[in-house]
Image (spheres, grey):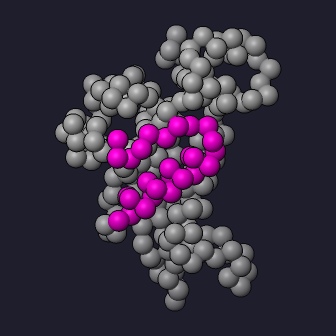
Amino acid sequence: MSLFLTIFAGCQSRDKALTTYVLKIKKEKVRIGVLPFDNISKEPDAAKAITQVVISKILQKGVFEVVELGEINKVMRDLRMRTSVEGLDNVTLRKLGKALKTDLILWGQVDNFGETRIGQESYPAISLTIRLIHATSGKILWGSSATQTGNDSIILFDIGRVSTLNKLSQVVVGKMINSLFASRKKIVSAIETIVE
């Protein structure tokens, strides 16, 4: 947990009080469980695709040890969780966190994953929500929702157009994960109040 707090607080942090506090917790890389996303879109494989992109973007940051999806799926079966949002009460969250050996659970939902027509053109469209939850307390540490189409970044003459769902997924999830890391000070503060 200390590595998480240290890195999340910023490696160049000069705040000795936080650094001292962090060293008291643990000295290991922090595990994060990324639950399979829920899917309420019309595309049956949307949740699987987005979950993989989220895991990839988190791993690119090099801060977390991400729990393998196979391990998460096994624990969810053992806890009789059919979907990640179903049964995410505090008792289940604590059991999930304990079984996965993590205090951090990332959950998400895909609301839209497909094509949309704008004028005479079709563009990819994505809408999703992601939350970082503290497994022991059930407190939401961070959350983000995003809706974007492939034409949102067009400047002129199709410059900036995103033409595939895969590329749009990378862009949208990338922004959301960057937002997660930009919120690190608030997350650290929230964790501190929980741990104390």
- Give the main secondary structure, helix, strand or loop, of the magenta stretch: helix
Residue, far bottom: 120
Horizontal side of residue 15 vs 148, given as left or right: right
Looking at the image, which residue is at 19% across and 39% down? 80
Looking at the image, which residue is at 28% across and 37% down? 75
Front-most of residues 100 and 17: 100
- Span shown in magenta: 45-72
- 96 falls in the magenta region: no
Expressed as whole percent of the image width and height from the top left, the position of residue 103 reads: 44, 27
Vertical comparison of 99 with 175: above or below:
above
Instruction: Name which quarter of the figure residue 9 lies in.
Output: top right
Vertical comparison of 49 with 177: above or below:
below
Instruction: Name which quarter of the figure residue 185 lies in.
Output: top right
Horizontal side of residue 103 vs 20, given as left or right: left
Expressed as whole percent of the image width and height from the top left, the position of residue 177 reads: 58, 47
Expressed as whole percent of the image width and height from the top left, the position of residue 173 reads: 55, 55
Front-most of residues 81 and 86: 81
Expressed as whole percent of the image width and height from the top left, the position of residue 120 reads: 52, 89
Which quarter of the rendering shows the N terminus? Answer: top right
